[in-house]
Image (cartoon, coloured by chain):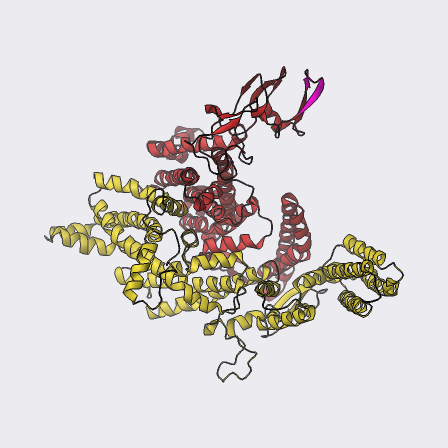
Chain colours: A red, B yellow
């Protein structure tokens, strides 16, 4: 062990090297800061844009409505009203805080919630137009600066800035979840295709046919017999649907493994089934990628989204993820094609490690660099796709405010330029920083592209 | 080379079959009943009356015409419980109920009997209502109507609790002096349902079974049609020619042939994409060449940043912004705000030149929106490809030979960096058939994109399946075309035997 310590891991760590390279790109580093800011906005959206004060003193009692509404399930509290001599009930998310006689208050930077409409500033009030509000004395007066709709309102008086802040959460999570799904599918399929190629996966005929039978029966019992259970689950709610799908997948996996095992050990006793056969993994997966790429993607997403009666943002994430894994799969495949013939993989083989350990423990971790790049570009593409869908009004529930749905309102009302410019800029900014980060990652991680 | 092309074309076939199958599967999973939708559309136009019998007959005819009275595919994998004639039941909701009950209890004969009992009960009740119309009070008539309504909902209900609830409600409704005659019918329905519960064969639902239907199925008819191939068609009821003969079926929206609509709409999208690619080349290639040639000059830097920004601007943002600025009476009213022609002025008899003059202002903004993204992409690709080539030895050799700089750049470097140009070009046709859903929606251009968008909103699946299929074919042809062109441009690429 001693002599090895001379060259420590740290000195030659690829990760550190790549991070140093990345840091040299000032624009990329700056983009990373902006991304950090967007993540901050997304996480704390409920405190940045809310019509409830962060702190308020009312009738001698101290409230933290914006915080309390997050932790207090009933959203209510009561306060002693001395003038009437009764307990006054306050429901935090409904109370007209701006019209209440607060002794002191600290308001959120944007003092509006995205889903509530301001009846005094309806019909597209612009950022520089005259804005009014009803003060605690019941008079309609010009708003103080901290109650202004900084970026204007839409037709029913919803605050655009608040919509943007809360839309950040949706956009970022759609990008993350969709690409997460795509990455799982793409990395696994790409790794199998690249590592085994067309001749690398050899098995006994018995095992092969056992697996084929297992696929059939796994599908039959997992998804046909349990089809109605899954359907009922989905209709009952997202979580129950996912749970039922998970159970089905589990059943599928168990049946598949059982049949494969039986095929190997029972069928494998017969002479014909004992002979080895090769499974053309690469051909099958490459064909699958070709098929996915030969379909118009936006049309596919729109069509699948229109199949479901209930619109939901999770559905959009899932559809986007299930249709966009091909890029990641191709990158992983190409990278593993290269890696599999390297000496250290040969060494692992010679040591008799099993294939799963070689692929997921040795080959994949060293081939993930290009995958990170395509994940970064993929997030940009997913955010763009989600906003396109919201823009077209397909797939995203009507009551959810997203950047795309804000923009689509501007399509019909040309006067309301703020409905076009600000959401459009938000989308542009997010897509751009992900693209810049992706390009910087490519320069930093891919030594072949460096001069 | 020819061998390679032939091999590639043969490889297309399974891919295309899978694409069409996938599109077909999506169309089957679509919610609602297409016949129902078509009839509703026709009814809104006042084409047919609301007589129930007439409607049933019309439904049957329509189902036959659309080929929906056939099984879906050559075979189906189901359970032992599933009947092999379920596709014959006309109503989609009824089919769902029957399928679900049989999957649950596994005894199809009893389920079928239950269904027929309900049908018979509906007939009896409506006959009774018609025959006794004069003797019944309005309250009783109302009760009778509600009984019919309950019976009809039984045809679609699968949940045990709801069925029991409906059965009880029917019995309660019939419990008057005049209507008590009908009580045995309600009892019959109830006992038919109880028979299902009492004779469960649930094990049947756990055993897989393959049912073979042969070539009389929806997919086969969609692909090959039902007219004979080499003889004159004598049977007027057989009007499907099949995709292989260019017939993509009938639109669910207006019963027009899908292919006719595509031919109507396609020219707009095609014109837009041809022009946009032309302009993209016109702008992008010189920029790409120049910025690669003068690498790191201020022009290179400025154009890189500009192109990067253009590339990441979402097209729906740019399109809307262009409308807000250039088609807005309050800002600049330079262009019309949408559509392709002014129906008040446009005259189809105009000479072509005048038509083009009329159309041109409508197409400027869409064209800009169509073009900016691809030219940004193309210039960036061009620059990278040129940089790859420009430092290579054979370029130095060309210069050393004393060739003029123009010849070196335009002949030697350019020729070797044509790959991105080819790639973009091979995408023109699929782009045109897919249209750009977003751009055509923003500018209301009656091209394929808008057509697809409306088809999706209206669940017009024959159209969607057609677009998927044609798009797939064109994409694959585009790939092949690109591969061949790569070999033509770069002699080092060869697809022959190594």
Counting labels gives 0
Location of residue B51 in the rendering, given as x and y in whole percent from the top left corner: 68, 68
The residue under the point 40% across, 33% down is: A32
Verify whether residue A86 appears in magenta. yes
Location of residue B487 in the rendering, given as x and y in whole percent from the top left corner: 29, 62
Q: Is residue B35 left or right of residue B427?
A: right
Location of residue A196 in the rendering, given as x and y in whole percent from the top left corner: 47, 54
Location of residue A351 in the rendering, given as x and y in whole percent from the top left corner: 49, 45
Span shown in magenta: A80-89
Reply above or below: A217 against A5. below
* Camera-nearest residue between A429 and B132: B132
Quarter of the figure with the C terminus of chain A: top left
* Camera-nearest residue between A67 and B36: B36
Verify whether residue A389 appears in magenta. no
**Residue B184 lies in what quarter of the image?**
bottom right
Task: Look at the image and tell me whether residue A193 can be seen.
Answer: yes
Q: What secondary structure prevails in the magenta region?
A: strand
Reply above or below: B238 against B126. below
In the image, farthest residue toward the right: B177
Reply above or below: B398 against B63. above
């Amino acid at each position: 062990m001693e002599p090895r310590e001379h060259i420590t891991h740290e000195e030659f760590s690829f990760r550190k090297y790549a991070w140093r390279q990345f840091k040299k790109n000032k624009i990329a580093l700056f983009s990373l800061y902006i991304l950090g800011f967007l993540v901050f906005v997304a996480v704390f959206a409920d405190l940045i844009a809310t019509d409830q004060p962060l702190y308020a003193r009312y009738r001698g009692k101290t409230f933290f409505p914006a915080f309390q509404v997050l932790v207090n399930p009933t959203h209510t509290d009561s306060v002693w009203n001395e003038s009437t001599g009764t307990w006054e009930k306050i429901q935090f998310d409904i109370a007209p805080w701006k019209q209440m006689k607060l002794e002191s208050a600290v308001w959120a930077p944007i003092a509006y919630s995205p889903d509530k409409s301001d009846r005094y500033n309806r019909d597209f009030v612009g950022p520089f137009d005259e804005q009014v509000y009803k003060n605690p004395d019941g008079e309609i007066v010009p708003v103080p600066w901290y109650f202004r709709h900084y970026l204007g309102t839409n037709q029913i008086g919803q605050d655009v800035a608040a919509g943007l802040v809360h839309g950040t959460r949706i956009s970022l999570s759609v990008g993350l979840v969709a690409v997460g799904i795509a990455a799982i599918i793409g990395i696994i399929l790409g790794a199998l295709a690249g590592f085994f190629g067309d001749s690398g996966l050899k098995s006994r005929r018995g095992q092969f046919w056992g697996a084929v039978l297992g696929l059939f029966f796994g599908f039959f019992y997992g998804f046909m017999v349990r089809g109605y259970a899954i359907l009922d689950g989905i209709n009952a709610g997202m979580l129950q649907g996912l749970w039922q799908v998970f159970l089905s997948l589990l059943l599928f996996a168990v049946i598949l493994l059982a049949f494969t095992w039986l095929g190997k050990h029972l069928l494998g006793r017969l002479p014909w089934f004992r002979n080895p056969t090769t499974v053309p993994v690469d051909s099958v997966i490459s064909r699958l990628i070709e098929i996915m790429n030969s379909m118009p993607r936006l049309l596919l997403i729109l069509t699948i989204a229109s199949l479901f009666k209930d619109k939901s943002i999770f559905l959009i994430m899932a559809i986007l993820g299930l249709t966009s894994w091909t890029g990641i799969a191709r990158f992983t495949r190409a990278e593993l094609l290269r890696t599999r013939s390297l000496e250290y993989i040969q060494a692992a083989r010679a040591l008799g490690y099993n294939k799963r350990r070689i692929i997921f423990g040795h080959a994949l971790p060293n081939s993930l660099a290009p995958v990170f790049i395509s994940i970064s570009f993929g997030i940009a593409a997913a955010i763009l796709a989600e906003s396109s869908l919201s823009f077209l009004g397909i797939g995203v529930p009507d009551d959810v405010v997203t950047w795309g749905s804000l923009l689509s309102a501007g399509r019909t009302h040309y006067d309301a330029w703020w409905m076009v410019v600000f959401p459009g800029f938000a989308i542009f900014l997010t897509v751009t920083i992900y693209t810049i980060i992706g390009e910087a990652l490519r320069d930093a991680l891919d030594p072949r592209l460096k001069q | 080379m020819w061998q390679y092309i032939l091999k590639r074309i043969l490889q297309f076939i399974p891919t295309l079959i899978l694409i069409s199958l996938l599109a077909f599967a999506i169309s089957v999973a679509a919610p609602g009943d297409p016949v129902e939708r078509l009839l509703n559309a026709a009814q809104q136009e006042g084409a047919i009356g609301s007589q129930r019998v007439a409607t049933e007959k019309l439904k049957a005819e329509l189902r036959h015409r659309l080929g929906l009275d056939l099984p879906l595919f050559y075979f189906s994998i189901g359970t032992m419980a599933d009947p092999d004639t379920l596709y014959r039941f006309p109503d989609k909701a009824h089919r769902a109920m029957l399928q679900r009950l049989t999957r649950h209890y596994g005894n199809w004969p009893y389920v079928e009997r239950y269904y027929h009992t309900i049908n018979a009960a509906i007939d009896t009740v409506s006959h009774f209502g018609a025959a006794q119309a004069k003797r019944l009070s309005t309250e009783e008539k109302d009760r009778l109507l509600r009984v019919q309504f309950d019976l009809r909902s039984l045809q679609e209900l699968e949940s045990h609790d709801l069925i029991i609830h409906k059965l009880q409600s029917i019995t309660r409704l019939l419990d008057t002096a005049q209507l008590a005659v009908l009580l045995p019918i309600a009892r019959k329905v109830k006992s038919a349902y109880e028979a299902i519960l009492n004779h469960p064969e649930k094990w049947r639902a756990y055993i897989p079974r393959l049912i073979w239907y042969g070539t009389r199925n929806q997919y086969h008819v969609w692909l090959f049609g039902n007219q004979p191939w080499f003889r004159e068609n004598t049977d007027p009821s057989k009007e499907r020619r099949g995709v292989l003969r260019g017939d993509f079926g009938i639109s669910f929206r207006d019963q027009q042939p899908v292919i006719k609509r595509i031919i109507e709409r396609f020219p707009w999208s095609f014109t837009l994409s041809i022009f946009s690619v032309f302009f993209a080349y016109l702008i992008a290639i010189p920029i790409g060449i120049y910025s690669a040639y003068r690498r790191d000059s201020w022009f290179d830097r400025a154009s890189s940043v500009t192109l990067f920004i253009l590339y990441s601007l979402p097209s729906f943002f740019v399109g809307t912004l262009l409308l807000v600025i250039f088609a807005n009476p309050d800002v600049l009213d330079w262009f019309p705000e949408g559509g392709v022609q002014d129906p008040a002025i446009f005259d189809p008899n105009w000479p072509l030149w005048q038509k083009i003059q009329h159309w041109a202002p409508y197409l400027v903004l869409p064209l800009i929106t169509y073009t900016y993204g691809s030219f940004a992409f193309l210039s960036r690709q061009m620059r990278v490809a040129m940089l790859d080539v420009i430092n290579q030895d054979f370029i130095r050799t060309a210069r050393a030979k004393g060739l003029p700089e123009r010849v070196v750049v335009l002949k030697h470097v350019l020729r070797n960096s044509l790959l991105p140009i080819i790639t973009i070009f091979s995408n023109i046709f699929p782009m045109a058939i897919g249209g750009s859903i977003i751009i055509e929606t923003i500018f209301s251009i009656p091209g394929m994109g808008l057509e697809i968008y409306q088809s999706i909103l209206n669940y017009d699946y024959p159209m969607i399946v057609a677009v998927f299929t044609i798009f797939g074919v064109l994409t694959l042809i585009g790939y092949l075309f690109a591969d061949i062109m790569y070999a033509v441009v770069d002699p080092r690429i060869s697809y022959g035997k190594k």
